[in-house]
Amino acid sequence: MSIEVPFLNLQAINAQYQVELEEAAQRVIQSGWYLCGRELESFEHNFAKYCQTKHCIGVANGLDALTLTLQAWLEMGKLNAGDEVLVPANTYIASILAISKNGLVPVLVEPNPNTFNIDVQKMQAHLTDKTKAIMAVHLYGQLSEMEAICAFANSHQLLVIEDAAQSHGATINGKKAGSFGDASGFSFYPGKNLGALGDAGAITTDDDELASTLVALRNYGSHKKYENVYQGVNSRLDEIQAAFLNVKLTHLEQEIAKRREIAQRYLEMIDNAHVELPKVEMAEAHVWHLFVVKSNNRDALQTHLMEQGVQCLIHYPIPPHKQQAYPELSELSLPISEQLHETVLSLPIDPTMTDEQVKHVVKAVNSFSG
Ligand SMILES: *Cc1c(COP(=O)(O)O)cnc(C)c1O
């Protein structure tokens, strides 16, 4: 009998909560109130509490969470057009888009190839008079070195924004992702560790003025109906998605625990000289949004796994500076990022995976002959 292992089984994940999700949907449908109501208010309260921050502001998606935060800082006079933002070179394109869309300049910093996160040692060399912020991306679910990043930011008067789209619930000494920086952007895209059943996102922050500016920006730049203070956007988190997220937030810790269990088994049981396992320094700092291995023969490994029924994906195949959308970045020399993009492969990791499926992935990886 052949075993199939899908990369991520969203149907199975959400089926666990079918009854609660249906109740939530019914509540919203019957309420007659579909935007900026009680469900959003309750989710914002619950998620701020979960992230240990004073505020949570729901928006339409993770990209908007990052874009609107930077716009808010421009409106507040904390940033100016042309300012530079340090950002890891191997991040997902959304981090870069949020910066460039605001007329700010992304300055790509090489990652540490062991953690995949921004290499703190390399930030100093990129500092100029124009450097005004750092965007720390907690890639694949592992927190960046936030203590060092915040210390560096403090000594150079830089703002810190966390791109926490992949790291809901990760902690360092009990402190949660989304509570380290001046602000943090989250995505609740269906495939994220905390996923809606559609698009959604949020910003967490302790800053009252930023929170209030964001509440206006997401709603046409208006605090009061028909009075527009800023050139805002329509980026609201729907009541129905907020209701689903309220359900799923209550199960997040348990899902993270399952992801950690699977990751632990992979780390203990995968043994192949052609496959390099991810390194973890602190177990609680990683929530395993993705389980990313490296191989010098990555494409052959992917083909081999696919032949064994194991679906695996590449995060990400093309680095931002090599994207057609950014010709101005194409001449940069970023050998570490470029090499990572050629060697990384994400194995299935999903809280609904069975024992048998986990064993099958291990067996398939171990039987790769290079
Ligand atoms: C998913 C993701 C985003 C964007 O989130 P959307 O909800 O898809 O807009 C931003 N940054 C990172 C690192 C992501 O993984």
Image (spheres, grey):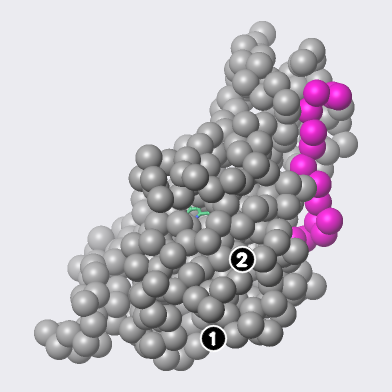
Q: In which quarter of the image is residue 158?
A: bottom right
- Between tags 1 and 2, which lies in front? 2
Q: Is the magenta stretch mostly helix, strand or loop?
A: loop
Which amino acid does the dot numbered 2 rest on?
A: His
Residue 358 x/y as whole percent: 73, 30
Quarter occupied by the N terminus: top right
Residue 94 x/y as whole percent: 44, 54
Secondary structure of residue under mark 2: helix
Quarter occupied by the C terminus: top right
- Seen from the viewer's position, the closer of residues 341 and 284 is 341
Residue interval drawn in magenta: 272-285
Q: Classify 80 as above or below 97.
A: below
Image mark for residue 126? 2
Q: Classify 227 as above or below 313.
A: below
Which residue sits at x=68%, y=84%? Answer: 155
Residue 368 x/y as whole percent: 76, 16
Residue 50 visible in the picture: no
Disc 1 target residue: 206
Which amino acid does the dot numbered 1 rest on?
A: Asp
Residue 150 visible in the picture: yes
Q: Residue furthest left?
A: 226
Look at the image and say whether residue 282 sits in the magenta stretch. yes
